[in-house]
Amino acid sequence: MKIAPILRVTGLVLLAYFLLETTLDTGDKYAIVEYPVIWLILAVILVFAIAIELSVGALENVLYKTLKPDAKVRYDLAAQQREENRFAWLKKTYNKLLDKKPLEKEAEIVLDHDYDGIRELDNNLPPWWLYGFYISIIFAVVYMANYHIFGGTSQQEEYEMEIAAAREAVEEYKRTAPDLIDENTVELLTGQEDIDAGKTIFSANCAACHKMDGAGGIGPNLVDDYWILGGGIKNVFHTIAEGGRAGKGMVSWKTDLKPNEMAQVASYVLSLHGTEPVDPKEPEGELWMDPDAKIDEADVDVVDPNELEMELDNTGREY
Ligand code: HEC
C-alpha cells in the first residue's frame, strides 16, 4: 500500500469536514453534533475517494502492463526522476542555509595555521545563523524604540494594570454576589422585593417567638426603639447570624439562612420599626441610637464658657 493515496483520501475527508464545520452556522456547538447526517456525508465522501483511488491505481496498472518494454523503462525512469525532484527545493534551501564546503573542496579554504597538525578551515558563517543575528539586531532596535522611547507598556505596568483590573473584578463580584454579605458589609435593604422576601422568611422562622407583627412573645418586641443586642442593620444582622445571649432562646440562623436571606429578614425586622402592633411587649434593653445617623440640626448653647449644653435634634437627648 502506498502512502500518497492514503494521505490524499484523509486530506479530502478532513477538508470536507472543515468546510462543513465552518460553513454551517451552529453557534458554539459543533456542526457534527448538531447535524449527525454529516457523519453520513463524510462516510460517502470517504467511500467515493477510496473508490476513485482504487480505480485510478488499477487503470495505471493496466496501462503499464500494455506498454512495450522500452516504454516501460522510460516510464520507470520518469517516475524515478519525479521521486528525486520531489524535495529538491527543500534540499537546496537547506544546503544554502548551511553554506558548507563539501569535504573534497576543503583544501580551498584551509588556513596556513597549523597547531601540531590541527589545521583551521575558513568557513563562511552559516547563513541561518547570520540571518538570525541580523533579525535579533532589528528586533532589539524595534524593542528599544517601542518600550524605551515611545513608552509602550512595560511588564511592570502590564502587571499593575492586570492587578487593578482583577481588583475591580473582585469588587464587582462582591457587589453582585449577595451571599458574601456579612455583618460588616450588610446594608439596609429597602426594595419591596427584599422586604417581601424578608417577610416570608420571618413568618416561617421567627413569628413563633416574635409574633408576625413583631410585637414580641418569647422573644422581645422588635418594633420599638429599645434593643437588648443593639439596633441598626449591622447589629440585627449579627444577632440573627450569631444568635442572642446563651440560653435565651434566640439561636444562630446562619446555618439555616443564606447571608442575603438574613439581610432580607433583618431589613424586614427594621421595616417594622414604628408600626403599632397589637399587644406589644414591654420594651427591653436600651434606647438605640444609630451612631452613624447624620445630625440634622445641632443647637449649641453656651451657658457657661466652661460648660457646653448641646441639643441634638434627631434624638432629643441632651448633653
Ligand atoms: C425560639 C424563639 C425565637 C425564634 C424562633 C427567633 N427568635 Fe429572635 N429572639 C428570641 C429571644 C428569646 C431573643 C432575646 C435574646 C437575648 O436576650 O439575648 C431574641 C432576640 C432577637 C433579636 C434581638 C432583639 C434585641 O432586642 O436586641 C432579633 C433582631 C431577633 N431576635 C430576630 C429574630 C429573627 C429575624 C428570627 C427568625 C429568623 C428570630 N429572631 C427567631 C427568640 C426567638
Image (spheres, rainbow, N blue to C red):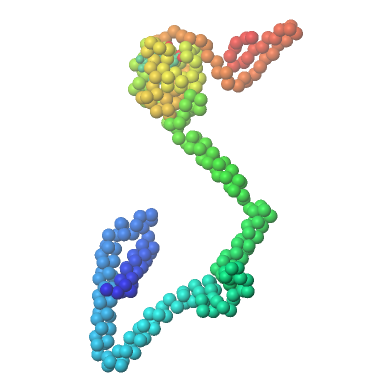
Front-lying residue, 44 or 294: 44
Q: Residue at x 54, y 79 (%)?
A: 105
In the image: residue 202, left or right of residue 124: left
The x, y position of residue 243, in whole percent, is: 41, 17
Quarter of the rendered image showing ligand 1: top left
Tell me residue 236's x, y (percent): 46, 19
Q: Quadrant of the C terminus?
A: top right
Quarter of the image with the N terminus in it: bottom left
Residue placed furthest toward the front = 116
Above-or-below relation of 132 to 319: below
**Image point (69%, 13%), residue name:** 300
**Total numbered labels placed on residues in the image:** 0
**Is 54 or 74 nearer to us in this picture?**
74
> In this picture, is 180 found above or below 66?
above
In the image: residue 244, left or right of residue 150: left
Expressed as whole percent of the image width and height from the top left, the position of residue 280 reads 42, 11
Residue appearing at x 28%, y 76% in the figure: 53
Taking depth in this image into account, of 78 and 14 the one nearest to the observer is 78
Task: Kindly indicate the quadrant of the structure image that contains residue 63.
Answer: bottom left
Residue at the extreme right: 305
Where residue 90 appears, as percent x and y from the top left, is 46, 74
User: What residue is drawn where x is 59% and y is 48%?
Assistant: 155
Would residue 255 appear left or right of 159 to someone viewing this image? left
* Residue 160, quarter of picture: top right
Measured along the vertical axis of the image, is residue 147 above or below residue 15? above
Left or right position of 184 against 214: right
Camera sees residue 215:
no
Camera-side residue of 88 and 255: 88
Q: Quadrant of residue 52?
A: bottom left
